[in-house]
Amino acid sequence: MEKKVEIIQINISGEDKPGVTSALTRILAEYDAFILDIGQSNIHQTLSMGILFKTTQNKAGNIMKDLLFKAYELDMNIRFTPISEEEYEEWVGMQGKNRYIITLLGRKLTARQIEEVTTIVADQELNIDSIIRLTGRIPLDENARAPKSCVELSVRGTPRDRAEIQRRFMQLSVDYGVDVSFQLDDMFRRCRRLICFDMDSTLIETEVIDKLAERAGVGDKVRAITESAMRGEIDFNESFRQRIAMLKGLDVSVMQEIADNLPITEGLDRLMVVLKRVGFKTAILSGGFTYFGNYLKHKYGFDYVYANELEVVDGKLTGCHVGEIIDGKRKAELLKLIAQVENVDILQTVAVGDGANDLPMLGEAGLGIAFHAKPKVMENAGQSLSTIGLDGILYFLGFKDSYIN
């Protein structure tokens, strides 16, 4: 006679201590129970664990009795929930649905920010499977607080309106000072291999052409054109020609002085150390100038630099450039070219930039991140990072502080 199958879920909670999982699974092993699912988490030395197992009806009573006694012995709370075969099959069927990763990142995270994000998730009929903290534990002393805080939600389901969820997350970022990344949780997210950066106002906290213009005595004129171009109000190539023409006669030695004093963006050192450690290929794709791109390449170990070459004659800038202009279209082309050279699928690429001329490469990359960007760029980019430095990218890639510190 075929023995009836019983499916039981147990939930255990209490003070975390060595040997709890071993003691409970030992009982299941003694009765040859089959574990269908298992998971546990620890918050402030409090264990919360769930086990879903299958057994036969004649063994179920003894298993629950032994587990109950063991839980009492361990001073743990235990709850048993019978699961029907229909409920189990429905749950298994749900596993084929799309999975997404939502990353919340800021200087600090509040209950209000998390409540707003999870409300959007619920409104989109998505289910949260897990929540984990990516940054280290936060000290009570505000003065000793870690400069960043990040949690990651794994959610399951199909959003009712993908564009709407992105729009609401973007607005939440503006209203509550928190960055929210929404990514499909697929194999490509877990194996990014190439990351391409804009340079000015991304890797460095300035526009180098403005610095050169100040030394040439035309700072205000050039700065106005730069800001207009970055907002997408005028054609980048035309603005580029207008600006470098004003640099005519500037001594080339000025570039070395500016390079030696470049304001490096927060988090770049940490980001590059980790990216190189795990084998990323890195590139600078800039509408700025090769002189400064090469300076950063030698300092941080970038693999590629593509930028604009200023013409120099007799130690002076001529107000002209050499070769093609690296504009937004060319950045996207170079991203694809480097990916091909490195044998990297385009979905394994990351692009980071702040200006309108970065949008083509942000849209081409598997993960496009608008970094401290202008409003137009934030609206059109897939992801935005505005609350902390460049090392925030590591959390969008799924790294935990415990892995990389």
Image (cartoon, grey):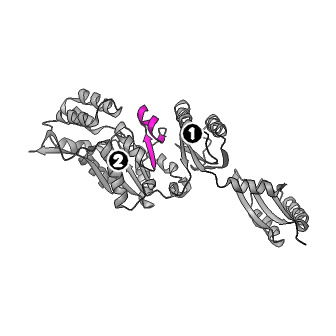
Q: Residue lying at the far left in this picture: please name it.
A: 314
Where does residue 30 sit, x and y in percent of width and height? 83, 72
Circle 1 — which element? loop
User: Which of pointers 2 and 1 lies earlier in the amino acid sequence?
Assistant: 1
Circle nearer the viewer, 2 or 1: 2
- Residue 390 occupies which quadrant of the picture? top left
Is residue 379 inside the magenta stretch? yes
Circle 2 — which element? helix
Numbered range of the magenta stretch: 366-384
Q: Residues within 10 Å of mark 2 (few under 14, many from 20)?
A: many
**Looking at the image, which residue is at 80% across and 55% down?**
86
- Is residue 71 visible in the rendered image? The answer is yes
* Amino acid on which the number 2 mark rests in the picture: Ala
Residue 146 versus residue 313: which sits nearer the camera?
A: 313
Checking the image for residue 332, the label placed there is 2
Q: Which residue is mark 1?
A: 108
- Is residue 12 visible in the rendered image? The answer is no
**Looking at the image, which residue is at 79% across and 54% down?**
87
